[in-house]
Amino acid sequence: METPGVRKTANWMHPAVVIATGWWFGRMPVAPGTFGALLGLPLAWGISVVESPWLQIAIIAILFAVSVPICTAAAEQLGGKKDPGAIVLDEIVSLPVTFFLVPREQLERPWVLVAGFVLHRLFDITKPPPARQLEHLPTGLGIMADDIAAGIYSWIGLHLLINWLGIT
């Protein structure tokens, strides 16, 4: 299977590549980021089970910190391109930011999951400032940082929908 933007001799079995591509979800020929982001939904739900918001923040921060070197190593294994499209760990780890502080009972509502997911993909694809600028940070940090910004934007949008507009 040919993956756009990745060299043919890519080491797809390297542990960093397996993790960073979301167990190869990132190899999808169309919309790999969208397919990869789907893996962020169960992660977001799992983090929501943790009672303490501070512990939730710590978990997301640790996942981010661990993901930076994983994405750096995976990008090197995939040919050294700045942000290969096959890497979807950034989408997986940033999606829980979108659902931070959304009560678990609301996470069980399909419209909340769909709205948060769509908002996250919208902001990840369009990269409003400063997300686009964060992409220029070195290696794995740049891969991860713009998606965290997308997570923050989509968090704001989702909470506006839930709280201010009263759509529940």
Image (cartoon, rainbow, N blue to C red):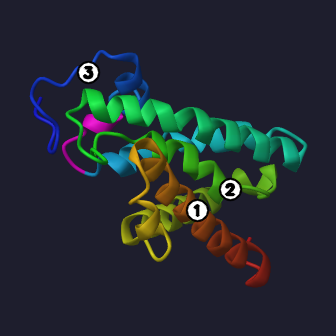
Mark 3 = which residue? 12
Q: Amino acid at mark 2?
A: Phe
First in sequence, mark 2 or 1: give its number.
Answer: 2
Return the mark for residue 137.
Answer: none
Q: Is residue 47 above or below residue 132?
A: above
Mark 1 = which residue? 116
Mark 2 = which residue? 99
Magenta residues, start to end: 25-30
Q: Is residue 160 above or below residue 105?
A: below
Q: CA distance from mark 3 to mark 1?
A: 30 Å
Find the residue positioned furthest to the front.
138
Closer-to-camera residue (13/140) = 140
Q: CA distance from mark 3 to mark 2?
A: 31 Å
Is 27 included in the stretch rendered in magenta?
yes
Assign a secondary structure to mark 1. helix
Is 159 included in the stretch rendered in magenta?
no
